[in-house]
Structures are given as structure tokens and as C-alpha cells.
Image (cartoon, helix red, strand yellow):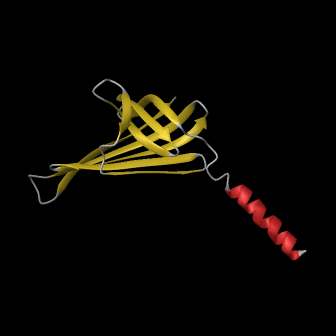
Amino acid sequence: MKKTILAVSIILVSICSSFAQTRDFDGLWKGVMEKENGEQYTLTLFIEDNNVYGVAEDEDGDLVKDRQFEVQTSKGYGEQLNFFWINKGGVWTETQMFSISWSSETELSVYHMRHVSNKSDEKDGNTDWGYFAKGTLE
């Protein structure tokens, strides 16, 4: 009897844990993001198997996955998917992070943070700037 209860318990835990990532985020998503200061911009993301990519146009004008970043990571859990990238060039380093929440089959809620640091000519160290934005992708 104990072995039966243990076996049933393991099966139930396995079934429940298989729903940890219950949402399918796959697709091409686009929407308007609004910064804290009211400025707006369009964000387009391509999601495939919980991997998030920025979108760029190739020389023919076709949309392609933007793979220009040295560091790029995505991780999903439950109703959330998080994506960040880091890039560097010359005197600057930049990080962008996206927290994506599944709202419905046709809508994602996104919070976006951008942080850029620059080597300073005026002091020993860096200066930095950034912004927060939020929006909905469809």
C-alpha cells in the first residue's frame, strides 16, 4: 500500500510540474511601448520555444532574428518569460531587460528596462543613463 501511495504521489507531482511553463509565447509580437517621460516607440519580438529575439530587417527587407548581441538569454516560468541582452562598443556598455507576462493568446504585457554606461572624460569612472517602459504586444 505504501508503494502504491508513493507511486501515485510521484505521478501526481510529475503531472503538476509539467505545467510549470503552461503558456505558449511563440510568435511574432509587436506593440507600442511608453517610456516614463511619455515618449513612445515600437517593439517587435520573435519568440520561439521560450527563446526571445529582437527583430531586424535584412538587405531584402525581410524580418529576421537579431543576433548581434554578445550576451543574450531568455528564461520562462509559468506565465512569465524574461529576456535580456548585453552589448558593448567603443566606450559604452548596454543592457536591456524585458519582463514579459502572458495576458492572453493575443496579448503580452511587457516591462522594459534599458541601462547604458559610458566611459567618462570628466572623471575616473563611468556615466550612465537609462529608462523604463511598459506596453502591450499583440
Query: What x and y, as percent, mark residue 121?
Result: 8, 52
- For the point 45% across and 41% down, the residue is 111
**In the image shown, does 33 or 10 lie closer to the viewer?**
10
Give the residue at the far front of this rendering. Answer: 60
**In the image shown, does 58 or 86 lie closer to the viewer?**
58
- For the point 45% across and 28% down, the residue is 31
Please tell me in which quadrant of the rendered image residue 11 appears.
bottom right
Residue 126 visible (yes or no): yes
- For the point 43% across and 35% down, the residue is 45
- Check the image and report above or below for 133 versus 77: above
Residue 36 visible (yes or no): no
Give the residue at the far bottom of this rendering. Answer: 2
Query: What x and y, as percent, mark residue 135?
Result: 46, 33
Quarter of the image that includes the N terminus: bottom right
Image side of residue 135 versus residue 11, left or right? left
Query: What x and y, as percent, mark residue 2?
Result: 87, 76
Image side of residue 90 versus residue 32, left or right? left
Number of numbered callouts drawn: 0
**In the image shown, does 108 or 59 lie closer to the viewer?**
59
Give the residue at the far top of this rendering. Answer: 61
Give the residue at the far right of this rendering. Answer: 1
Please tell me in which quadrant of the rendered image residue 132 appears.
top left
- For the point 31% across and 50% down, the residue is 86
- Check the image and report above or below for 99 versus 123: above
Query: What x and y, as percent, mark residue 113?
Result: 38, 44
